[in-house]
Image (cartoon, helix red, strand yellow):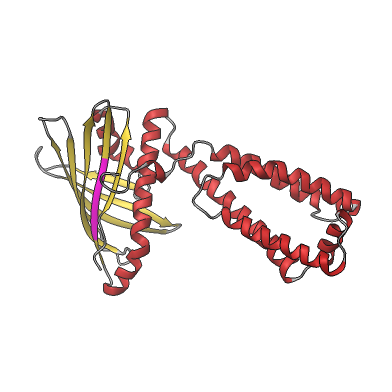
Amino acid sequence: MKQKPIYVEINMNTSIDTVWEYTQNPKLHEQWDLRFSEINYIPKETEDSPQTFTYKTNVLPFISVEGWGESKGTHHKDNGSKTSSLHFGTEQKISPITQGKGYWQYVLNENQLTFLTQYDYNVRYGKVGQAFDIVFRPLMGWATALSFDVLKRWIDTGEPPAVQYRRFFLSILISVLFFFIWFYQGLVPKLLVVHPEEVALLTALSSMEGTAAQLAVQGIGLAEILYSLFWLMPINKRPLFILQIFLFPILTISAVLASSETLVGPFNVLTLNMTLFVLSIIGLSLHQNIPTAKSCKRKRGE
């Protein structure tokens, strides 16, 4: 089945010349565009010749994809807009893309500039490649939209893309860590094992005993697993970080009140919860004003 072209659009409060410079200068372009790690222009034969270039994308450590490209800019004098057409491709078998075409458009819209792109590409490996593209294409669209937002923030605030991406990916790393911690704590000691210490702590803090306490521990474990899933969702994580900043001290005090012996064991509740408390503060700080693909339109006319 033929996939739809990738379309991304964002509005900026700046001039066409500024965005043109940030997108057509290869050393600036490679900084904000997540899809490219290096872009090198090849000298033109004549002034009117298309601009050819080579690019490299670092996929994983020691693994990269190299390819070629050709672009040509057009200035529409009647409305002041500009268009840059693009033809690109790679011969490397590691890439699911063989070659593709698209364009960037810079459109003046009253007091704003609309920067948009649409591109499509062919895949290799036949039906297998087409099946893989069902996942790969949305990922490319997301990377394009995230890159556009990084560019907008770079122009608006002056914050370099490297700093934005560092904060973005560290925030993701912390979110994955909290998912693992809550999922593991809910599944293993509470649901699979129903650890005696979990039951004893709950019994000390409540009037429940025996089977009732075990069932309650299992219920808490299920709640923790459900809560862990929020950390994997593409939602604003600020409320989760704020909740944990209040929650971890409460959990620590409750555990100490239930049994003071929890303070003397290795990797005890105090050291663990204080670590998670500080990580929640760091995560909240990192999560402020992080770039997001949601700031872009992904369909025409949205």
Q: Is 268 contained in the magenta span? A: no
Quadrant in the picture for the N terminus? bottom left
The x and y percentages for residue 157 are 42, 28
Q: Which residues are magenta?
A: 116-121
- Farthest residue, direction right: 260
Give the residue drawn at x 54%, y 46%: 170
Q: Position of residue 195 (x, y in %)?
A: 80, 67
Q: What kind of secondary structure does the magenta stretch mostly adopt?
A: strand
Report the residue that reaches farthest toward the bottom: 127
Residue 190 appears in the picture as rendered: yes
Identify the residue shown where x is 72% and y is 68%.
191
Q: Quadrant of the C terminus?
A: top left
Q: Is residue 25 visible?
A: no
Q: Quadrant of residue 51?
A: top left
Corner quadrant of residue 253: top right
Tell whether 9 sits left or right of 161.
Answer: left
Would residue 47 appear left or right of 253 to someone viewing this image? left
The answer to whether residue 117 is magenta is yes
Percent of width and height locating residue 288:
53, 36
Q: Nearer the viewer, residue 158 or 239?
A: 239
Depth check, front residue: 235 or 119 = 235
Residue drawn at x 14%, y 42% as measured from the top left: 44
Residue at x 31% of width, y 35% of height: 11
**Residue 274 x %, y %:** 75, 45
64 relative position to 229: left or right: left
- Eyeballing the image, is 179 above or below 146? below
